[in-house]
Each structure stands twice: as structure tokens, then as C-alpha cells.
Amino acid sequence: MTYKTEQEAFWAGQFGDEYRERCSLEPELVAARTACMARMLRKAAPVKSAFEIGCNIGLNLVAMNRVSPGTELEAIEINAESAAQANRLGVAKVETGSILEYTPPRSYDLTMICGVLIHLDPEVLPQVYDVLFNASNRHILLFEYYNPTPVEVTYRGHEGRLFKRDFAGEMLDRFEGKLTLKDYGFFYHRDPISWSDDGTWFLLEKG
């Protein structure tokens, strides 16, 4: 398959396969992710449907299913085997493909992206912001590495594969008057209920 950016091919291929092998759905990790998901959505209205961009093996989908049982969950994942594994969990409908070539078939109460924006070519971020905004009926959840100004960081020996910036701020500016900050927070890697990495999350609301 031909991709628009080097980053897409990177994650769809061998590196994405290797990344998947480093991930797990161990009970302790699922419990931690569920606690974090509950915290991030504490100020959200009831979520009856949600769409995730870049779900990997489905950890966030499992957590979301536990926090909000009965929520209709859908996702897209660029790595075919990761998407297949997520589908086999039975909690969500997961499509294989690039978000740059995909239009969600409907709108959802919540759109979310966790640890994916940092790995995209910065040039395509506006397109992904538009998908997150247009596919959401109400809430948008971002969980990413934060930096007040754009900066590139070497990622596992690779250049051009990890970029930090103020993603939420860029979305608030892009959709000024149409999007507000509902809640935000930081997860510290030494917090027992946290995820594996430090990261900042933002819950945005339309209207």
C-alpha cells in the first residue's frame, strides 16, 4: 500500500509490528488504563458512542468499555495485525487503514486519540484535527506528550518520528468559538494508577 507520509509506512510496517509486541493487555495495565480513562472523562456527558484514531491492540477500547459499558465503540488502526487483535477483543468495530484516507461513517459522542498525534507528520495535523472535530457530536479527548512550542525528539534511534507540541491549543485556535476546554490533567509515570509514560490529557467540548 502507498502512504502519503513516511510516518504512516513506519507504523504500518515492521516498526509497528515491533511496537505491538511491546504492548499488552495484562490485567494490571487494563486496570490502570481504566482508572485513567475514568478520570479523563469525569466531566464528560454520558458517552453512548466513541471513535478512536490509532487504537493499536485495543487497550483504550477495553478501558472505555469498562468505564462506560454499552457504549458503541469504533476505531481505525493503520497496522493490520494490531487492528485484527483489537477486533478479536469483541468490544469495538475496528477498521484497518490510515486516518488520512478515511472518513468516519457517522458522528460520535466522543472522538479520541492517545499517543498518536505525536507520531504524525506535523504537516497533516490540520487534517486529523478536522476529523476529530467533524466526527464528534460533543467531546474530543486528547492524550499526548505536551510542549508549549513544536519540537522534534529522537524516537528509539529514529528521526522524524516523534513531535511534541500544544495539540489541544492548536485545536482550540483552529476551531475558535466552536470548541472549549472542558478539563485537563497530567499523568505521572510514578503514579501507581498512571500509564507507562508521562503525558497530558485534554477533554474538549463542542458548542
Image (spheres, helix red, strand yellow):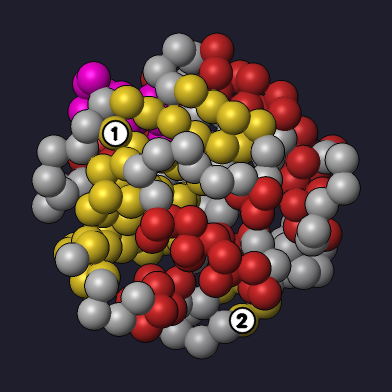
> Is residue 82 a member of the stretch shown in magenta?
no
Image height of 194 relative to 82, above or below: below
Horizontally, residue 61 falls left or right of residue 47, namely: right
Residue 180 lies in quadrant:
bottom left
Name the residue type under label 2.
Answer: Val
Span highlighted in magenta in the image: 60-70
Picture quarter with the N terminus: top right
Horizontally, residue 5 falls left or right of residue 137, namely: right
Horizontally, residue 90 falls left or right of residue 101, namely: left
Kindly report the secondary structure that dominates the magenta region of the rendered protein.
helix
Residue at 69% across, 67% down: 121
Label 2 neighbour load within 10 Å: few <14, some 14-19, many 20+: few
Which of the marked residues, 1 or 2, is nearer the chain's N terminus? 1
Q: Dot 2 lies on which element?
A: strand
Image height of 51 relative to 115, above or below: above
Residue at 26% across, 50% down: 137
Residue placed furthest toward the front: 105
Q: Nearer the viewer, residue 189 or 84?
A: 84
Residue at 71% across, 35% down: 79
Picture coordinates of residue 13, whole percent (x, y): 83, 40
Q: Dot 1 lies on which element?
A: strand
> Is residue 62 a member of the stretch shown in magenta?
yes
Residue 98 lies in quadrant:
top right
Instruction: Quickly name the residue at label 2.
Output: 151
Instruction: Quickly name the residue at label 1.
Output: 49
Residue placed furthest toward the bottom: 149
Picture coordinates of residue 44, whole percent (x, y): 15, 49
Picture coordinates of residue 80, whole percent (x, y): 72, 29
Query: Does the rendering let one see residue 32?
Result: no
Name the residue type under label 1.
Answer: Ser
Distance from disc 1 to disc 2, alpha carbons, whole Å, reads 34 Å
Instruction: Select label 1 or label 2 by which is in front.
Output: 1
